[in-house]
Image: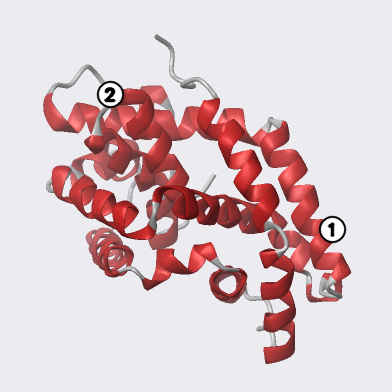
Amino acid sequence: MNFLLHRHLAEAHTGSRAAGAGAMLPDLWRMADRRVRPRGPEGAGGPLGGRLAEVLVGIQHHVASDHWFHGHRVFLEGEKLVAARIREAGLAAKRMGLLAHVTWEMCLDGALLRRAGFEATRAALTEGFSAIEGDFDPAATMHHFGALGRTAEERAAFDARMKRLRAEIERGPWIEGYQYGEGIALRVSGVRARLGLAPLDASDHARLGHALDDVAREADAILEEILRAPSPLPD
């Protein structure tokens, strides 16, 4: 599950915009530094109050949602669908099958944007980031930096990348592109670069975009099933 759908579900299930923003953090942490991951429910330490507690609930919701999602047909069948469309587009030799997982998650974010509206989603994102201003650092410390021996330089680089990620998300074009095959193909190209895979040429990029446009109808239908699922958090 990608960060937009994580945010939406966490806010819907908890009624907290701060929890919704918190649910995005594990995905954003990994973009800023692949070593930074949530440690599970025990990773946040003892009971806390205030807005930070809501952020930590959002992170817990993220972990629980991923556990449910990755074992459910809404993910398994969608991943297979994307892999099949990639093969049909003649892109299997480009090792695109390795990215069917993340590509399907982006397709679901696109379905969410088509359903909820891009501008409404961007406004919710901006409000969510503002709601947890000052709680980014403590949450990352509790789940990662406070327990592992990382240098001050590594932490500073992580914080700087997180600020850039937030700015790019709020700016809009990044997430707006999830609504269209071409936009998802562009984001997938970025993932390929981070993994050290060869870039797609213009023809490959166009074929991938068309293939992902064909996935949109299925993504719209499966999104509705995901939105009807109960909260993965215990009552």
Residue at 64% in and 40% down: 222
Side (left or right) of 170 relative to 219: left
Residue closest to the eye, 228 or 29:
228
Q: Is residue 145 above or below residue 58?
A: below
Q: How is the image coloured?
A: secondary structure
What is the total number of numbered labels drawn onto the structure image? 2
- How packed mark 1 is, by other alpha carbons closer than 10 Å (few <14, some 14-19, many 20 or more), is some
Q: Quadrant of the C terminus?
A: top left
Q: Which mark is residue 107?
A: none
Gap in Å between the C-alphas at discs 2 and 1? Answer: 43 Å
Side (left or right) of 206 relative to 132: right
Residue kind at label 1, given as amino acid type: Ala
Q: Quadrant of the N terminus?
A: top right
Q: How far across and how far down the image is residue 118, in percent?
A: 37, 59
Residue at mark 1: 84
Based on the displayed image, in which of its 4 quarters is residue 73 positioned? top right
Residue kind at label 2, given as amino acid type: Gly
Residue at mark 2: 45
Determine the secondary structure under disc 1. Answer: helix
Q: How far across and how far down the image is residue 151, in percent?
A: 28, 58
Residue at 29% in and 43% down: 21
Is residue 39 something that shows in the picture? Answer: no
Q: Is residue 51 above or below residue 85?
A: above
Determine the secondary structure under disc 2. Answer: loop
Q: Earlier in the sequence, mark 2 or mark 1?
A: 2
Q: Is residue 38 above or below residue 159?
A: above
- How packed mark 2 is, by other alpha carbons closer than 10 Å (few <14, some 14-19, many 20 or more), is few
Q: Nearer the viewer, mark 2 or mark 1?
A: 1
Side (left or right) of 77 relative to 116: right
